[in-house]
Image: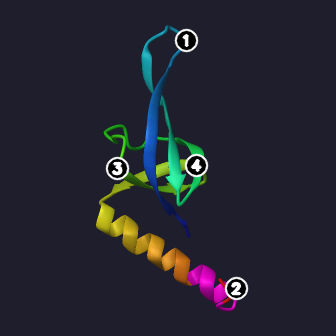
């Protein structure tokens, strides 16, 4: 089973391949996960734009999601965290 976390793309950079050409395998970006920003591989979602939301698993963006779906997933993650902490959050 795969668990993915929603995040908002803050920046995108396309790393060059050995010949100096832009490479889709080198597509990376900074993604914000509710205040925590991480470098993420964006190669599976080459059409993604800054400000859009992605679902990330193991450091790889595996899908683009609309803002409403991202917000729903964020709400669910918060509910899980609250249950895990015994409601002390």
From the viewer's side, name the closer residue of 65 and 21. Answer: 65
Residue found at the very far bottom of the displayed protein: 86
- Residue depth check, mark 4 versus mark 1: number of the one nearer the observer: 4
* Residue 52, numbered label: 3
Give the magenta part as a residue range. 80-87
Query: Which badge, 3 or 4, is on the more N-terminal residue?
Result: 4
x, y (%) of residue 2?
A: 54, 66
* Residue 87, numbered label: none
Give SS at disc 2: loop
85 part of magenta stretch: yes
Q: Is residue 9 visible?
A: yes
x, y (%) of residue 17?
A: 51, 16
x, y (%) of residue 69?
A: 33, 68
What is the distance, in whole Å, between disc 1 and disc 2 at their CAs? 48 Å
Image point (62%, 89%), residue name = 83
Q: Which residue is mark 1?
A: 18
What is the distance, in whole Å, between disc 2 and disc 4 at their CAs? 23 Å
Q: Quadrant of the C terminus?
A: bottom right
Q: Which residue is mark 2?
A: 85
- Are discs 4 and 1 less than 8 Å apart at CB? no
52 part of magenta stretch: no
Image point (55%, 67%), residue name = 3
Query: Which badge, 2 or 4, is on the more N-terminal residue?
Result: 4
Query: Which badge, 1 or 2, is on the more N-terminal residue?
Result: 1
Give SS at disc 3: loop
Query: Which badge, 1 or 3, is on the more N-terminal residue?
Result: 1
Q: Is residue 43 visible?
A: no
* Left-right relation of 78 to 14: right
């Amino acid at each position: 089973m795969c668990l993915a976390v929603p995040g908002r793309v803050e920046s995108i950079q396309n790393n060059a391949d050995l010949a100096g050409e832009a490479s889709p395998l080198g597509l990376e970006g900074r993604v914000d996960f509710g205040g925590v920003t991480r470098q993420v591989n964006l190669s599976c979602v080459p059409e993604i734009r800054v400000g859009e939301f992605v679902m990330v698993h193991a450091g790889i963006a595996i899908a683009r999601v609309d803002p409403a779906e991202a917000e729903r997933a964020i709400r669910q993650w918060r509910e899980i965290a609250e249950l895990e902490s015994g409601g002390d959050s």
